[in-house]
Image (cartoon, rainbow, N blue to C red):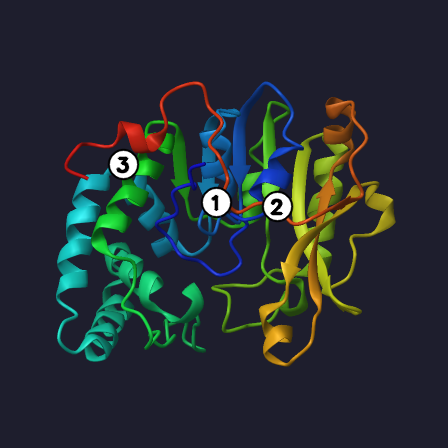
C-alpha cells in the first residue's frame, strides 16, 4: 500500500481521516470546493481516487495557498529551492530556522513557508497578535529530507496539476459561487476560538455567521460536508450544529489522544462529520453513525499508474 503524498505538514490536517470522509462523496462530482483547505489533504485524497474532475482550493492564509499552487504548478523549481534551503541549515540548524522565519515574516515567500512547516514543532503554525509566524523549531529533527520532499511534491503535482484553482478569499465568497454540481468540504477553524484571535489560526470565524451561511446553502439545496466539532473522553469541543439544519451527524474515532497519553490517561478523540440534506438525498445510503479508526496506510486504489510510478527517474 502506498501513502498519499503530503509535502505540507499541517496540524489539524484531515489526511488520516480522508478514507472515511471520501465514503460520502457521491458519484459524478464536477468540482470539489475546499473553502478552508489547509494542506488540501481531502482534495489530494479525492484526486488519488479519481473521484473529482476539478478542485477549488481556498484558504484565507495566502502564503499557504500560494505554496499549494507552487506544489501543483512548479514542482521541480520548488523541490530544488527546498533542497538548497534545507542543506543551508548545517551546521547551526536552529539559527538557520529563525533566520528563515524572520525572512518569511518580511516577505511572505511561500517557498520559505514550506521549510518552516516541515521543521516547526508538530507541523503546527502559531501567529502572534500582528499575524506573524512565531512557532519554534523542533529541536529533535531537521525537517523532511529533500529526497522525501521531492517525491511528495511531485506526487501532489501529478494528482492536481491542471485541475485545481487556488485562491485566498473569505469563505463566504467561495460558497456563494458554487452550484449543484459541486461538493463543498469545510473544515473551519477550531470552533472553541471562532470569532477570536487565536495563535493557532490565521483567522477565526463567527459561529453564528457560519450557521447563517449553512442555512443559505441548504436553501439552495447544495451538497456539503463539514468537519466541525469533536470530543475527547467526556470533554466536548464546541457546540453541535443546530438540529434545524437537518444535517446528518457522524462520529469518527480518530484514535487515542497523544495529549492525554502524556498525562497517563487513555482517552480517545472523536471528530464529528456533518452531511447536508441534499448530499444525503443524492447518496441514497444510510450513513454509519460511528466509524472506527482508519488505516493510515491509505492506498491510491486507482486504475492508472500511481503517482510514484509517474515520478521522474531522478527523483
Residue 125 numbered tag: none
> Residue at 23% across / 64% down in the picture?
107
Q: Is residue 124 visible?
A: no
Give me the C-alpha separation between circle 1 and circle 2.
15 Å
For the residue labelled by badge 1, is the local secondary structure a helix, a strand or a loop? helix
Q: Which residue is mark 1?
A: 41
Please state if 264 lies on the left or on the right of 34 as rendered: right
Q: Is residue 109 visible?
A: yes
Q: Which residue is mark 2?
A: 294
Please state if 140 lies on the left or on the right of 32 as rendered: left
Vertical arrangement, residue 52 with respect to residue 40, above or below: above
Q: Nearer the viewer, residue 246 or 151?
A: 151
Residue 309 quadrant: top left
Residue 118 percent across, percent down from the top left: 33, 61
Residue 73 numbered tag: 3
Front tag of 1 and 2: 2
Residue 312 percent across, percent down from the top left: 19, 32
For the residue labelled by badge 3, is the local secondary structure a helix, a strand or a loop? helix
Disc 2 and disc 3 in contact, CB within 8 angstroms: no
> Residue at 19% across / 62% down in the picture?
86
Residue 14 percent across, percent down from the top left: 55, 50
For the residue labelled by badge 2, is the local secondary structure a helix, a strand or a loop? loop
Amino acid at each position: 500500500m502506498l501513502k498519499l503524498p503530503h509535502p505540507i505538514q499541517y496540524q489539524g490536517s484531515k489526511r488520516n481521516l480522508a478514507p472515511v470522509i471520501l465514503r460520502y462523496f457521491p458519484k459524478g462530482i464536477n468540482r470539489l470546493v475546499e473553502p478552508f483547505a489547509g494542506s488540501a489533504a481531502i482534495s489530494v485524497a479525492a484526486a488519488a481516487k479519481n473521484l473529482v474532475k476539478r478542485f477549488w482550493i481556498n484558504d484565507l492564509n495566502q502564503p499557504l495557498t500560494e505554496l499549494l499552487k507552487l506544489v501543483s504548478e512548479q514542482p521541480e523549481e520548488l523541490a530544488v529551492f527546498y533542497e538548497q534551503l534545507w542543506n543551508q541549515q548545517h551546521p547551526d540548524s536552529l539559527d538557520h530556522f529563525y533566520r528563515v522565519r524572520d525572512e518569511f515574516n518580511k516577505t511572505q515567500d511561500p517557498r520559505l513557508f514550506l521549510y518552516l512547516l516541515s521543521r516547526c514543532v508538530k507541523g503546527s503554525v502559531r501567529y502572534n497578535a500582528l499575524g506573524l509566524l512565531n512557532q519554534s523549531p523542533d529541536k529533535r529533527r531537521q525537517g523532511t529530507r529533500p529526497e522525501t520532499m521531492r517525491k511528495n511534491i511531485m506526487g501532489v503535482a501529478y494528482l492536481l496539476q491542471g485541475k485545481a484553482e487556488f485562491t485566498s478569499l473569505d469563505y463566504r465568497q467561495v460558497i456563494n459561487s458554487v452550484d449543484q454540481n459541486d461538493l463543498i468540504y469545510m473544515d473551519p477553524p477550531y470552533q472553541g476560538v471562532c470569532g477570536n484571535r487565536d495563535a493557532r489560526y490565521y483567522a477565526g470565524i463567527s459561529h453564528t455567521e457560519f450557521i447563517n451561511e449553512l442555512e443559505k446553502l441548504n436553501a439552495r439545496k447544495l451538497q456539503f460536508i463539514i468537519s466541525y466539532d469533536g470530543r475527547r473522553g467526556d470533554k466536548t469541543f464546541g457546540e453541535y450544529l443546530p438540529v434545524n439544519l437537518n444535517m446528518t451527524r457522524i462520529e469518527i474515532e480518530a484514535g487515542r489522544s497523544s495529549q492525554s497519553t502524556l498525562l497517563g490517561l487513555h482517552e480517545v478523540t472523536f471528530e464529528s462529520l456533518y452531511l447536508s440534506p441534499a448530499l444525503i438525498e443524492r447518496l441514497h445510503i444510510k450513513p454509519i453513525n460511528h466509524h472506527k479508526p482508519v488505516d493510515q496506510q491509505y492506498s491510491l486504489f486507482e486504475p492508472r499508474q500511481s503517482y510514484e510510478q509517474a515520478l521522474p527517474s531522478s527523483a
